[in-house]
Amino acid sequence: MTKTIITTALAAIVVLTAVPAAFAASPSENVTFKVSTAGLDLRTKRDAQSMLRRIEIAASAVCGGAPYAGDLGATHHYKVCVAYNVGQAVNQLGSPVVSEISHQSTATQTASNGR
């Protein structure tokens, strides 16, 4: 019985949506990606890292992919969009291990940017 409950819980899906219209190609654009937790045990660090990577890849796609590095304005908007969507998805997922890894990653990036 416990195995069935865990399997059902791990089959949850996280949905990323490009909510901030400022980051979308057009104000009416609504892009959604579903990120599955299938095959992952989010109680383990390794699988939680895999889930976070899945979320980051989907967030990048939702935000239109990385722009040309020389376009600083577009790069800034892209990074803000990705960070927003990753944060929303991690919160929606509700996994303490994924949340912890995400927060550690954000803290490391902030420190490396000199903030």
Image: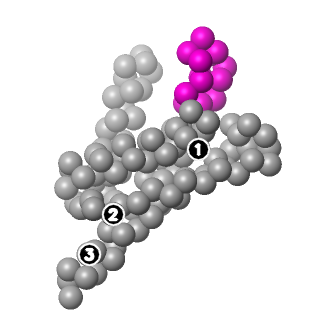
Q: Position of residue 12 (x, y in %)?
A: 40, 68
First in sequence, mark 1 or 3: give its number.
Answer: 3
The residue carrying pointer 3 sits among few (fewer than 14), some (14 to 19) or many (20 or more) residues within 10 Å by Cα, namely: few
Instruction: Tell me which residue sits at (59%, 18%) in the image.
Output: 68
Instruction: Return the residue nearer the eye: 63 or 97.
Output: 63
- Say if the magenta span includes residue 67: yes
Q: Which labelled disc corresponds to residue 34?
A: none
Q: Residue furthest bottom?
A: 1
Amino acid marked by disc 1: Val
Q: To which quarter of the image does residue 114 belong? A: top left
Tag 1 and tag 3, C-beta contact below 8 Å: no
Label 3: which secondary element:
helix
Q: Position of residue 59 (x, y in %)?
A: 52, 43
Label 2: which secondary element:
loop
Instruction: Tell me which residue sits at (45%, 64%) in the image.
Output: 13
Which is more foreground, mark 3 or mark 2? Answer: 2
User: The magenta stretch spans which residues?
Assistant: 66-80
Q: Which residue is mark 2?
A: 38
The residue carrying pointer 2 sits among few (fewer than 14), some (14 to 19) or many (20 or more) residues within 10 Å by Cα, namely: some
Amino acid marked by disc 3: Ile
Amino acid marked by disc 2: Ala
| Distance CA(mark 1)–CA(mark 3) | 29 Å
Q: Which labelled disc corresponds to residue 62?
A: 1
Q: Which residue is mark 3?
A: 6
| Distance CA(mark 2)–CA(mark 1) | 20 Å
Dominant SS in magenta: helix
First in sequence, mark 3 or 2: give its number.
Answer: 3
Quadrant location of the C terminus in the rendered image: top left
Q: Is residue 90 above or below residue 75?
A: below
